[in-house]
Image (cartoon, rainbow, N blue to C red):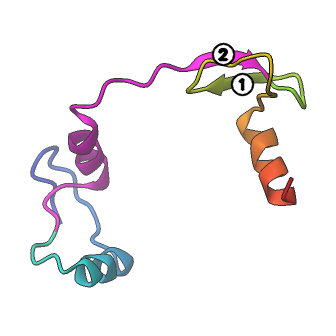
Amino acid sequence: MKCKDCGQEFVFSAGEQAFYAEKGFQNEPQRCKACRDARKNAGKPAREMHVTICAKCGGEARVPFEPTSDRPVYCSECFAAIKEQGQ
């Protein structure tokens, strides 16, 4: 398929087709995933990220909230590892 915004070719995968059918959507997508996401987020303000130090590895952590000293903050990798361990 061809995106009506950027003109790039894109694939309407079997998984996407099943999702559209499950949701009852009648029309096929006319935009690629990148253009659909851009349209969806166009009216939203950019999220402010704060830089801090990871409490586990000491590396840089970027978080979408203002860190406070009363709770540890982790980088993405350490947070995922902690979540995986069920802590």
Image quadrant occupied by the N terminus: bottom left
Residue 32: x and y in percent read 24, 55
Q: Which residue is mark 2?
A: 51
Which label sits on residue 43? none
Element marked by disc 2: strand
> Circles 1 and 2: CB distance less than 8 Å?
yes
Residue 16 higher or lower than 75, as above or below: below
**Quarter of the figure with residue 43:** top left
Residue 67: x and y in percent read 68, 19
Residue 54: x and y in percent read 81, 25
Q: Residue 39 in magenta?
A: yes
Q: Which residue is mark 1?
A: 61
Residues shaded magenta = 29-53
Q: Residue 60 in magenta?
A: no
Residue 25 higher or lower than 57, as above or below: below
Q: Residues within 10 Å of mark 2 (few under 14, many from 20)?
A: some
Which residue does the image show at 72% across and 25% down from the upper left? 61
**Badge 2 amino acid:** Val
Residue 9: x and y in percent read 22, 58
**Quarter of the figure with residue 12:** bottom left
